[in-house]
Amino acid sequence: MGLKGFVEGGIASIVAGCSTHPLDLIKVRMQLQGEAMAAPQPAPVLRPALAFQYPHIGGAAAAVAPTMNIPLPPPPKVGPVSVGLRIIKTEGMPALFSGVSATVLRQTLYSTTRMGLYEILKNGWTDPETKTISLAKKVAAGLIAGGIGAAVGNPADVAMVRMQADGRLPAAQRRNYKSVVDAIGQMRKQEGLKSLWRGSSLTVNRAMIVTASQLASYDQIKETILERGVLKDGLGTHVTASFAAGFVASVASNPVDVIKTRVMNMKPGSDGEMPYRGALDCAMKTVRAEGPFALYKGFIPTISRQGPFTVVLFVTLEQVRKLLKDF
């Protein structure tokens, strides 16, 4: 029964991860918007002849802005649809699946582990007489399972973030990993084994939050729907409970996800120094440069991805359970 939970969770997770990969890629690109502003750069001193580079400043101000070091407004932020269309236009349709091999490996390592461990813990903590388990124990099971799963899958997570973010860089700065195996191999060779667990504390924290909120809320909402007779145990119940669970997980995990993405994707500057000293430094610089709502960058694609991902995950899981119930 223990092994069965890992198999069921792994199959469902891989199907869900691959089917929603483009939305995850768009989310990563949006989370990296404005990152260059995190580290203040000295204002360039330009000749008046280059005043035409500032078309958004009109009249006489446009002619003197470069020489007076007038602060310029940040580039406009774009939404998920615009980001997706830009990726297709500049990189081609296949770019929406950049890093999908890393997604498969990540789901195989991370989600298979967390889903299997959650079932083992939940079954072990279920009252044998009443066949029930409290919400607090479900949350605790999710926290433990998510943390262990994230520690196992962190190398694939780092590779996935880098492969998804690569297309936004100038051609000369791209890492151009051929696959997740190539990505992990190059990271180990060029940056050391430690780089494979870069941002691991954030990955673990995020995974604990996501797993606890996603799996525990799904079970709780599903049980409530069935107990109150709102719906029967079927597709309608599974979709309703899973979409609600996806929303809860998105709200709870987005700030950690933004910081995780930036820490994993960072590269040393011209002076050899990393832009962030760690998660807390990244959070402070992000909020200082872009405001507190920057921690919810990519929330629309996060919920747009987390909702369908969670629905596909649990609907597939329920079907796989039916297929394997006699094993």
Image (tube, rainbow, N blue to C red):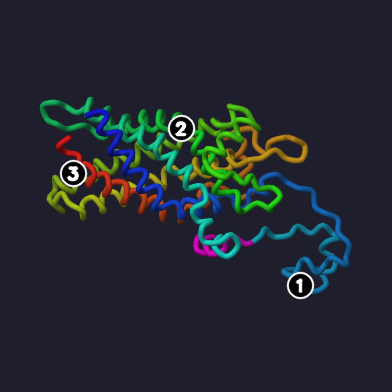
Q: Residue at x 40, y 40 (%)?
A: 107
Q: CA distance from mark 2 to mark 3?
A: 31 Å
Front residue of 116/214: it is: 116
- Determine if the magenta segment contains residue 80: yes
Q: Provide the residue span drawn in magenta.
A: 76-86
Using the rendered image of the protein, determine whether residue 212 is visible from the camera's viewpoint: yes
Amino acid tagged 3: Lys
Front residue of 276/60: it is: 276
Front residue of 140/98: it is: 98
For this view, does 2 lie left or right of residue 285?
Answer: left
Q: CA distance from mark 1 to mark 3?
A: 66 Å
Residue under pointer 2? 204
Q: Residue at x 32, y 47 (%)?
A: 313
Q: Secondary structure at mark 2?
A: helix
Q: CA distance from mark 2 to mark 1?
A: 49 Å
Q: Nearer the viewer, mark 2 or mark 3?
A: 3
Amino acid tagged 1: Gly
List x then y, in percent, for residue 14.
37, 44
Residue under pointer 3? 322
Using the rendered image of the protein, determine whether residue 79 is visible from the camera's viewpoint: no
Q: Earlier in the sequence, mark 2 or mark 1?
A: 1
Residue contact between numbered discs 1 and 3, judged by CB atoms under 8 Å = no
Q: Earlier in the sequence, mark 2 or mark 3?
A: 2
Disc 2 residue crowd, few under 14, some 14–19, many 20+, Cα 10 Å: many
Residue under pointer 1? 58
Name of the residue lying farthest toward the bottom: 59
- Determine if the magenta segment contains residue 298: no
Quadrant for the C terminus in the image = top left
Amino acid tagged 2: Val
Q: Secondary structure at mark 1?
A: loop
